[in-house]
Amino acid sequence: TRVDARVTALKRHAGGVGLQLHDGRELDCDYIFDCRGFPQSVNADRANSPTDDEAVRPLPWIPTGRAMLRRLAPGAFSGVRNVTRAIARPHGWVFQIPLRDWTSTGYIFNPTLSSDAEVDADYTAFLHEEGVTTWEPRGALDFPNFVRRQLFDGRVFRGGNAACFLEPLEATAIGSAIQHARAAANWITEHPTPEGAEAEVARYNEALLTNVCRDSLFLAWHYACGSRWDTPFWRHARQGLDRARANPWAAPQLDAMKPFASAGRKLPMQALAQCRSQDDWDQHIFPLLKLFRPYGNFSELNFAQVGHGIGCY
């Protein structure tokens, strides 16, 4: 049954959870998927660290929190085609994504360290350096780096931006949404009714929260060696893993990252760069893999690619 109405509140009660609608109706449900976007405490905060209340855990080791967007003509960047790029700049980094009908680009930065005017000027300078002189401004938007302290309470599944958000450096929002949807589907398959499953809820949350934390630390690692820019942003960004080390929740997951970083070091950059076919992969890369499990959504191969790329190795 489709009910097209605005949800105003979720109300827990002894027998389940009620969905309060704007017209006064209330629907009783066994399970609810809450995908209403960022929590209110996050929306109220412009900076990259959401309000640290009971519902939300901020992830301050990620150094960004705002994006300035522009749209360019297809093939606007003549030097590099058909690949996504992430380019370090004084106030953060610029992405460029070639699409069929246009080129998407944006400048990701920290609004507490750089003003829109400063970023706009450097963004324009970068595009001019790339030979681009015309574009369509697409505005700017703030984003938080956060995760809900509880993604599932036994009745309500948080999904999408209602569950978590990390800066778009590795496009983790899609992977997290898929992972959370699959986990919820498996739960409902195994628990057609919620009764009697309370003891398992904590384990469910721990597994998903661990993955979000690990994804966030992998992103923070991208900044660990800095860049050619010695600016307030990059000095702050380089210290991200130090901030994580001081956090009791993140520190154990940072320790768990060490074997993956070590395994990535052993994958030679030249072999990775020259891998052009399935045969190359089968003969030269696959035999070198040691850890056949992920760290969050990332493998030792991803660690090798990033580790060599940032100069960590």
Image: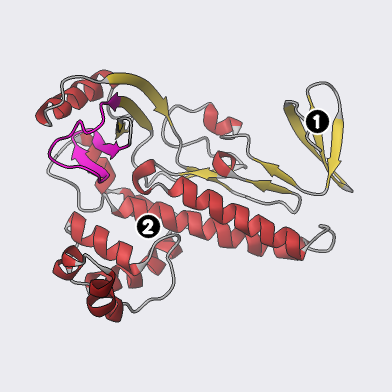
**Type of amino acid at the residue the image marks with label 2:** Arg
Q: Position of residue 172 (x, y in %)?
A: 43, 49
Q: Position of residue 265 (x, y in %)?
A: 23, 70
Which SS class for mark 1? strand
> Which is more toward the observer, 62 or 103?
103
Q: Is residue 157 left or right of residue 210?
A: right
**Type of amino acid at the residue the image marks with label 1:** Gln
Q: Magenta segment range? A: 71-99
Residue bearing mark 1: 20
Q: Is residue 72 left or right of residue 15?
A: left
User: What number of labels is visible?
Assistant: 2
Q: Is residue 298 left or right of residue 84?
A: right
Quarter of the image with the C terminus in it: bottom left
Residue 83 in the image: above or below residue 119:
below
Q: Position of residue 194 (x, y in %)?
A: 81, 57
First of labels 2, 1 by sequence position = 1
At a point 29% along the width and 19% down the height, the residue shown is 136
**Is 88 part of what is drawn in magenta?**
yes
**Is 306 part of what is drawn in magenta?**
no
Residue 75 in the image: above or below residue 301:
above
At a point 28% along the width and 52% down the height, the residue shown is 222
> Which is more toward the observer, 217 or 305?
305
Mark 2 → mark 1, Cα distance in angstroms:
42 Å
Residue bearing mark 2: 245
Regarding residue 198, the answer to whether it shows in the image is yes
Which SS class for mark 2? helix
At a point 74% along the width and 27% down the height, the residue shown is 8
